């Protein structure tokens, strides 16, 4: 009888099948089903494709909310999973908006200028059209020249590349400088906030080439779709926002559910130990930081055509702080928690600040929610931090614990263990 070594026995065994993404993270399927149902419901109730119960402005609000959910998911990955409290991710969101806004504003102005000059007795030259476009866009800041930063503004393809490359390159350079110096914790948060503040202050200047405090406006007018109604455009952007959120959620769920997810969670919990095990911690942090910045830029590129305007105030540090608050309230370290937090807080913000919430008359003082909404948000954040650190998403843990079997006995591996009765209580 031939001798078979232990190694040969193990080498002939079939490999264990790898579990799929849904098996490892069932919440992905539930989220996609909920998102699909929500998208279908809004479509059937909208003015463009449904019965008209939902107004065009509210459909735009819902579309913008989906974009905010996407950037919140990116923030949750970099903070909740990797442990990097970035207070600058909304800057990447704004840069994506500026990149697509430049093309929208240039192309729309080009159409207007061409129509106005078409009646001229002598056909205008390309140079004259370019000068007229520059004067139309930058006359508000006292200039009639097109800045160098607008060189490729007439190309949709190149501006779409800028949506990805500009936030990605900024995050790559900043992250490389910060992580190679092993800046961590609150110091890294301060650096990201300083980067955001510097960028915001620069954009406020007219010399930035992006119209300073005036920002870019008229972004809701899509070139080439002049005959389409705003109702149709709003539902199209709503679908695009829902698709982007679904793809982004699945992509990040795939990342955090695999080996990389284990490593970045290890970096969050004990960076020194992960480095001791031989992993290049800085590489993982730089990858996550850059990737989430790119996704934030894509979310911004979908958001601002629905908002219609973007200015440097959108990139101010307070916006990134709001983003962290959304993730904390929803429950960081769980992707659906970030979605819930962003959706709940942004919709409540629209309701309170938009005059939907009635004023509260206390007799001696009247609470007007347009003034007190930020106070309410701050109090909510403090209460969640103190008494519900898992956020709104922690409610799902309570449901899971309630449905789980309650074992009161010792179910060990010995012969007397109650294997048959396990889980029946």
Image (cartoon, helix red, strand yellow):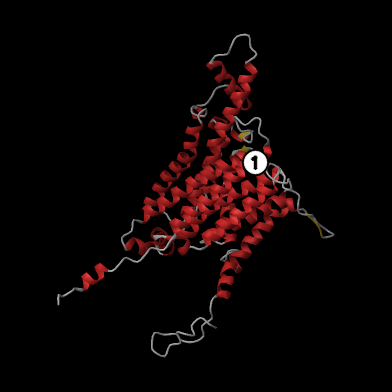
Q: Is residue 156 above or below residue 172?
A: above
Q: Quadrant of the N terminus?
A: bottom left
Q: Is residue 92 left or right of residue 122?
A: left
Q: Secondary structure at mark 1?
A: helix
Residue 202 in view (yes/no): yes
The residue drawn where x is 53% and y is 62% is: 27
Q: Is residue 58 above or below residue 379?
A: above
Q: Is residue 386 left or right of residue 254?
A: right
Residue 265: quarter of image: bottom left
Q: Quadrant of the C terminus?
A: bottom right
Measuring from the top left, give residue 386's x and y in whole percent. Answer: 60, 67
Residue 325 in view (yes/no): no
The residue drawn where x is 39% and y is 84% is: 413
Q: Most extreme residue toward the right, as rendered?
A: 363
Of residues 67 and 188, which is closer to you in this image?
67
Q: Most extreme residue toward the top, as rendered?
A: 121
Measuring from the top left, give residue 274's x and y in whole percent. Answer: 36, 62
Of residues 275 and 101, which is closer to you in this image?
101
Q: Most extreme residue toward the front, as rendered?
A: 1
Measuring from the top left, give residue 383's x and y in whole percent. Answer: 63, 65
Q: Is residue 156 above or below residue 274?
A: above
Q: Is residue 298 left or right of residue 231?
A: left
For label 1, the residue is 234
Q: Residues within 10 Å of mark 1 (few under 14, many from 20)?
A: many
Measuring from the top left, give residue 134's x and y in whole percent. Answer: 57, 23
The residue drawn where x is 79% and y is 55% is: 359
The residue drawn where x is 31% and y is 60% is: 278
Residue 102: quarter of image: top right
């Amino acid at each position: 009888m031939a001798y078979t070594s232990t190694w040969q026995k193990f080498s002939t065994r079939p490999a264990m099948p790898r579990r799929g993404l849904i098996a490892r993270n069932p919440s992905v399927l539930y989220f996609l089903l909920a998102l699909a149902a929500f998208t279908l419901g809004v479509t059937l109730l909208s003015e463009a494709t449904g019965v008209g119960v939902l107004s065009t402005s509210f459909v735009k609000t819902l579309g913008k909310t989906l974009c905010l959910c996407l950037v919140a998911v990116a923030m949750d990955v970099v903070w909740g999973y990797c442990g990097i409290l970035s207070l600058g991710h909304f800057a990447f969101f704004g840069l994506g908006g500026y990149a697509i806004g430049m093309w929208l504003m240039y192309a729309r102005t080009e159409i207007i200028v061409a129509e106005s000059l078409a009646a001229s007795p002598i056909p205008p030259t390309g140079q004259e059209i370019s000068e007229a476009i520059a004067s139309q866009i930058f006359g508000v800041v006292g200039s009639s020249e097109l800045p160098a930063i607008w060189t490729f503004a007439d190309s949709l393809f190149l501006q779409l590349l800028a949506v990805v490359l500009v936030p990605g390159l900024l995050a790559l350079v900043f992250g490389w400088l910060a992580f190679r110096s092993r800046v961590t914790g609150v110091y890294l948060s301060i650096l990201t906030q300083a980067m955001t503040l510097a960028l915001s202050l620069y954009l406020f200047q007219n010399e930035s080439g992006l119209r300073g405090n005036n920002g870019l406006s008229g972004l809701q007018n899509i070139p080439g779709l002049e005959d389409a109604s705003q109702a149709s455009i709003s539902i199209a952007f709503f679908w695009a926002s829902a698709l982007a959120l679904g793809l982004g959620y699945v992509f990040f769920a795939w990342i955090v559910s695999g080996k990389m997810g284990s490593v970045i969670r290890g970096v969050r919990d004990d960076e020194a130990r992960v480095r001791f095990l031989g992993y290049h911690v800085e590489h993982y942090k730089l990858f996550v930081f850059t990737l989430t910045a790119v996704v934030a830029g894509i979310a911004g590129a979908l958001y601002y055509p629905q908002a219609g305007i973007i200015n440097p105030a959108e990139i101010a540090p307070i916006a990134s702080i709001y983003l962290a608050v959304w993730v904390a309230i929803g429950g960081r370290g769980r992707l659906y928690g970030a979605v819930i937090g962003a959706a709940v807080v942004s919709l409540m913000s629209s309701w309170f600040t938009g005059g939907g919430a009635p004023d509260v008359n206390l007799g001696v003082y009247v609470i007007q929610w347009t003034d007190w909404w930020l106070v309410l948000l701050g109090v909510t954040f403090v209460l969640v931090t103190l008494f519900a650190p898992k956020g709104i998403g922690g409610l799902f843990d309570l449901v899971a614990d309630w449905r789980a079997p309650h074992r009161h006995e010792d179910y060990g591996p010995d012969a007397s263990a109650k294997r048959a009765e396990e889980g029946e209580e």
